[in-house]
Amino acid sequence: MNNKHHNTMGTRTLFFLLCCLVLVPVAAAQQRRNDPWWITLEEGKRYFRNGAYGDALRYFEDARESRKTYYAKMERDLITVLSLHTVRGLRDDLGLLEKYIEREFRVDAMDALKELYYRVPKARLNNSSTAALTELGRLKNYPEAEFWLGEVYRAEGEFSIALSQYQKAYDQKALLENPEFGREILYRIAGLRQLRREYTEMAKILDDILKTDTLWSRESFARSNLLRSLETNGVNRFLLLFRHNEPYVEKAHRTMGFYYYNSGRHERAVENLLFAFLIQNSVIIDALLHSQYDYTFTNLSNLMNDIGRRRDLLAYLEEIEYFKTTYFLANSLYAVNRRSAARELWTFLRDNAGGEWRGRALSQLNNPRLDPIPER
């Protein structure tokens, strides 16, 4: 009798635990759908950074669905009003539609328009009800969620799907909370193209990023002036005369410079690597000026000494491949017969860089040659 009762209780306990195992994920999924989409997205990022890619994927998908559901309801609410016989005679006049909605106290449609005007400048709608409905439907898209889904697929090695997600996010860039993030999406696309050795496609993407560099966009005038100054005045005087603090395009210049160098187009490599070099040093000098108002740049060797105690700037040197950039700029200059500038940069590397780049620079000073860029 007792054993039977014990077995029954045990069965009930097991059944209860199994139900919990089933219900907990269901409850969690329901909670994700109930949360605002931006909260769900942030939770997904947390899982992603902890390497829990499966959980991150579910959160990003739920964030996308949550936003879609939210704006789909508003879209339906507006369609409901626009479908009314009395409204169809308003001839696509958004102002008249607003008055009707207010007069008839159509609360749902009123809320839809308020949300729309918060997200989209009213002037862009050109007083068109049709345009308002179109824009409201477009708000169902969530480019940040598409991007982070791409991040998950990239992390799991599904590069084709990741590229598709990144492209989808970029196509929706007008909806980004931070418009500047569109450039980060392009960098992700370019990085995967490079990884897949699709260099022509990579170059097209990076060229799009470089169009946002105003100095670069002045074409040959600015570029030839910079190169002439470097050759005439030397590296240190060049950095005294010019500043170009555009950190968001530095990587594009650097990557394109390496690409052109490896493909034997050394004139193009010089242009991009010189811009990357100028931006890198401008960022470093400006950072020192920010923390020490009376700081004065004198020469590159002193600059390296000045950042020796700055962990943030030492980390920046690693991030931007500072010595590698300088080395292949020197090599490119040598290739286009700007040998004085090349030797000056190799000498700087010999005296200030460590390890690989010091050794390479010393070798170049003894016996110059065009060695290839190592693949990492």
Image (tube, rainbow, N blue to C red):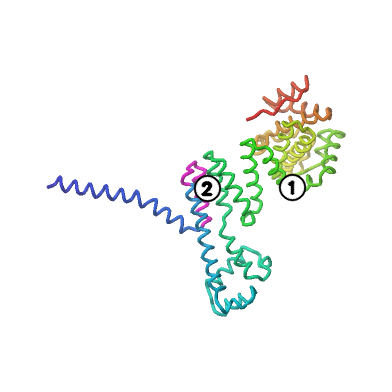
Which secondary structure lies at badge 1? loop
Q: Quadrant of the C terminus?
A: top right
Percent across and percent down for residue 254 are 71, 37
> Nearer the observer, disc 2 or disc 1?
1
Magenta-drawn segment: 37-55
Q: CA distance from mark 2 to mark 1?
A: 30 Å
Looking at the rendering, which quadrant does residue 266 occupy? top right
Percent across and percent down for residue 220 are 83, 42
Towards the viewer: 137 or 23: 137
The amino acid beneath tag 1 is: Lys
Percent across and percent down for residue 93 are 65, 74
**Mark drawn on residue 211:** 1
**Mark drawn on residue 45:** 2
**Mark drawn on residue 117:** none
Towards the viewer: 116 or 294: 116
Q: Is residue 38 magenta?
A: yes
- Please tell me whether residue 36 is drawn above or below residue 285 in the rendered image: below
Q: Main secondary structure of the magenta part?
A: helix
Q: Is residue 53 magenta?
A: yes
Q: Residue at x 59, y 69 (%)?
A: 113
The amino acid beneath tag 2 is: Lys
Percent across and percent down for residue 374 are 67, 28
Which secondary structure lies at badge 2? helix
**Horizontal placement of 18 versus 74: left or right?**
left
- Please tell me whether residue 196 is drawn above or below residue 106 in the rendered image: above
